Image (spheres, grey):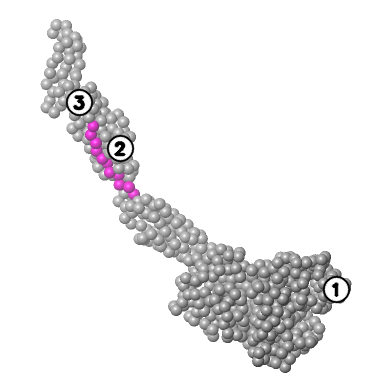
Amino acid sequence: MNLSDNGTPEGNPPQVTVNLATNGAETLAATTLAIQPPVIRRFSATPLAINLGQSTTLSWSVAGATSMSIEPGVGTVTGTSVTVRPTATTTYTLKAVNELGTVTATTTVTVNQPPAITRFAATPAAINSGQSSTLDWVVTGATSLSIEPSVGTVTGTSVTVSPTATTTYTLKATNDAGTVTATTTVSVTASPAAWASLAWTHELPGNYDSDVYRWLDSGKQQRTAVLTRNNSRDPGGSYGGMLRQFRFYLGTQERVATGTGASGLWNGWGYVVSHHGNGGLTHSGTIPGNYRQVFVGRHHAIHEFSWNLPINGTPVKATVHWFFATGRDHPVYAITFDSSAAAGGLSVNADSRSPYGDIAWDGDGINSYVDGVKWGDKYKFFSGTEPLTAQSTWDYTQPNVVPYTMAYSRSADAEMGMVQTLSWLQHNTGGTWFHTNWGYTSANRQNPGDFGTWLMPPNWNWPYQMCQYEMSDYNPTRSKRLAWGLMYGAVGSPSYYGYGYEGVFSGYPYQSYSVSMVMGRQSTGTVLTQVTQMERMLRGQLSATRGAVVSSGPVGVARTDSSAYAVPGYNSVYGAYELQSDATGAFTATLNAAGGELKNPVFLVHRSGGVPERLYLDGVLLTADVDYFASFDTSTGRVWITLNRAWSGSHILSSI
């Protein structure tokens, strides 16, 4: 074997040629052997920087290699170049190999990335026409942003839009490397038609000189209350001052309830009645009085009746307010007895059976039998055997929270009742001595000798007056009589025992309370549904971060004295949550419906600047006359607001 120098050009790795076999001067086989590793003269990318999606050429000049490869993503190569399309900035390594070793070289290709959109959303994603939504985004690497349609170039991280129809918005983010897009949709529901405002008119239905109030209830159906004036005798012979007629819809059918004229006197419902002394009786049906519209606003109204009732020769001022509100089904009847004219209190014990009356709550012309009665004080009483007779069974065993009383007709699918705006512990109700049967039933009744021939409580011992005086021993009754009840001494006595004889209370100089007047279907439990609503109202928790919660004030109509509210922020006179705005007229309040869902709660805001220009619920702009119903009383600087919402949990109501 002979070796010879190849005489390689300058810069190339030295090589030798090995003659593996010769035949004299002739070489039969030879091979060239490297005597050092390969040389990489150049390894580069053209261009060095590209945008995502573009390509670049890797090229090289290599000597003395028996094989070459490029990583990542390329592998074995030949020749002097290869095209690559990296998706991110990449450092490529060229490896050249021969028998004596391996050499490498690197070059980096920078890949310019387009922007990245990691979030593009609308909050809320669904709005009513006229409301707003906020588009917000998270974008990196953009030099410019734009949103279409109708927005254009944007900066920052959010923008507010108010589309009039369902709209898909496209966010475009751009830089030198390219453009990316994302979309989000805001669904727009056409706003429901605005609710009609409450209306008052002076009318003469059946020649009853009346103030007539019409409003839309929670189902957006009209209700009508006809209040007969009390300054002269009505066609039925009484001095009015009562609800002559109540009209409301059950589905598409209107139910009309008109005063029955029972006993030749009770031409409606809502009379003021007080028993006193030994058989004394004073009531508003025989006494002229005064009336006025305290306030008639866009969606709320307060109507007042007043009388000077002579009780044992002393004038007791009785004042009644009827409160109506758009979005609410049941008017509030609020009453105050002012006995301050009797120095130190009345000389006789007087009770209250107010409101009192007889109205066809089953619908005019029906005249159905009464199938049962129920009431609640500390315990719940309900009759069993139907129709109701003096021999009906009863149960008085279940504890109760909010006082109520009601009568019903299953055959007419009708009922009427009253529900107090405070609990029994907060305001004692009931006006007899039947508490000895708390916790008992007709099967184990106490003091059975008091019952005479009746299985039901004797008529003189019902805590609330209903149809008991119109019942015979065995036959059912059609009487629609219904009244409230307080103990003797509740009107005008500085100290009297409440029903149950568990506490002593004062009815001097004021006795005040409020009840909701409820009519509806027996099958849907309208009265007891309102009882549940009132229990939930009393458990509501009101707080304010702007303005203040009102925790004291007059606790009855026609009063100027101030007392602590039974529940801070809850005005029991009208069954409303009460707030004071701050010095600028703004308020932000949180109501936690801790006791359960509230249906269309009413707020009373002390704010001299009128109805706020805007109202927000949890930051979402509300639509007036659709989402809420507001009225401003210029005489008192108070704003009344009914929220058209089923209010569950905790929410924030704000004017800013």
Look at the image and tell me whether residue 2 can be seen: yes
In percent of width and height, residue 111 lies at 30, 44
Q: State the quadrant of the N terminus.
A: top left
Q: Nearer the viewer, residue 218 or 238?
A: 238
Which residues fall within the magenta stretch?
A: 104-114
Q: Nearer the viewer, mark 2 or mark 3?
A: 3
At 81% from the left edge and 70% from the top edge, which residue is drawn? 446
Please give the residue where the numbered disc 2 appears in the rendered image: 84
Please give the residue where the numbered disc 3 appears in the rendered image: 37
In the picture as drawn, the residue positioned furthest to the top comes out as: 24
Q: Which mark is residue 449?
A: 1
Marks 2 and 3, Cα distance to the nearest angstrom? 27 Å
Q: Amino acid at mark 1?
A: Gly
The quadrant in which residue 511 appears is bottom right
- Kindly check if marks 1 and 2 are in contact, taking CB atoms under 8 A apart as contact: no
Q: Nearer the viewer, residue 132 or 449?
A: 449
